[in-house]
Image: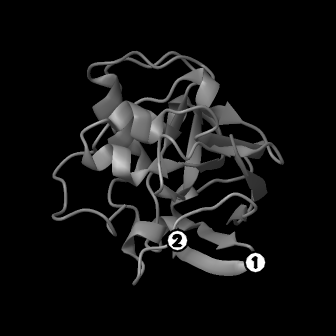
Amino acid sequence: TLDTAKELPTRPVLFSKPGTAVVGPGEPIQHNGAMTQQLDWECELAVVMGRVARNVSEAEALDYVFGYSIVNDISARDQRRSGQWFFSKGQDSYAPFGPMIVTTDEITDPHTLRLSLTVNGDQRQDGNSTHMLFKIPVLIADITSGVTLEPGDVIATGSPQGVGAAMDPPTFLQPGDVVACTIEGIGTLENPVVAV
């Protein structure tokens, strides 16, 4: 997210999340107070791959996409600052996903979708995929230059401004909070935050 970057990257910053990070709609986001006091949200458009993709050109990239969904890229900001990207991004439940996958025939241009996020009903993010720093074909081409993507793999495309770390003062998720991500044409992904 541009909110937390000191300068704009010249190419996508890549990281992966394990399967144990994925939870569905209504499932809890785990707040492990021993691991973080800075649990943050990031509403993102999710790209679901439909074909094996390796060394894909930007011109052909969208042909490899099956559909689109929502992912909330949960982040432990204090872990990232200490250099622990895996613990920052990959803990259990740090990738809420859903509520459905909408196929590419229903979303013909994924770069025109409104994204928004609320915490306990209060709006925190409101943006549009038009403003993505790196468009989907760029992401797919960059990733597949070194990694094979398989059907069902998911790419999170980046978050609009409005993350908690960038608020004044910074505001983070707490047990009892409810986070709702909405993307035009897809729906709403809502998850409670629970202490573990």
SS at mark 2 in the image: strand
The x, y position of residue 149, in whole percent, is 46, 20
- For label 2, the crowd category at 10 Å Cα-Cα, with few meaning under 14, some 14 to 19 and many 20 or more, is some
- In the displayed structure, 135 sits above or below 49; it is below
Front residue of this view, candidates 74 and 107: 74
- In the displayed structure, 137 sits above or below 65; it is below
Residue type at the position of mark 2: Asn
At x 42% / y 74%, what residue is drawn? 170
- In the displayed structure, 164 sits above or below 49; it is below
Residue 11 shows in this picture: yes
- 186 left or right, relative to 165: right
SS at mark 1 in the image: loop
| Quarter of the image with the C terminus in it | top right
The x, y position of residue 15, in whole percent, is 36, 33
- For label 1, the crowd category at 10 Å Cα-Cα, with few meaning under 14, some 14 to 19 and many 20 or more, is few
Q: Residue furthest right?
A: 26
The x, y position of residue 64, in whole percent, is 53, 29
The reply to whether dot 2 and dot 1 touch (C-beta < 8 Å) is: no
At x 21% / y 46%, what residue is drawn? 11
| Viewer-side label of 2, 1 | 1
Residue 59 shows in this picture: no
Image quarter for residue 84? top left
Q: Which residue is mark 1?
A: 121
The x, y position of residue 152, in whole percent, is 63, 23
Q: Which residue is mark 2?
A: 128
Color scheme of the displayed model: one colour
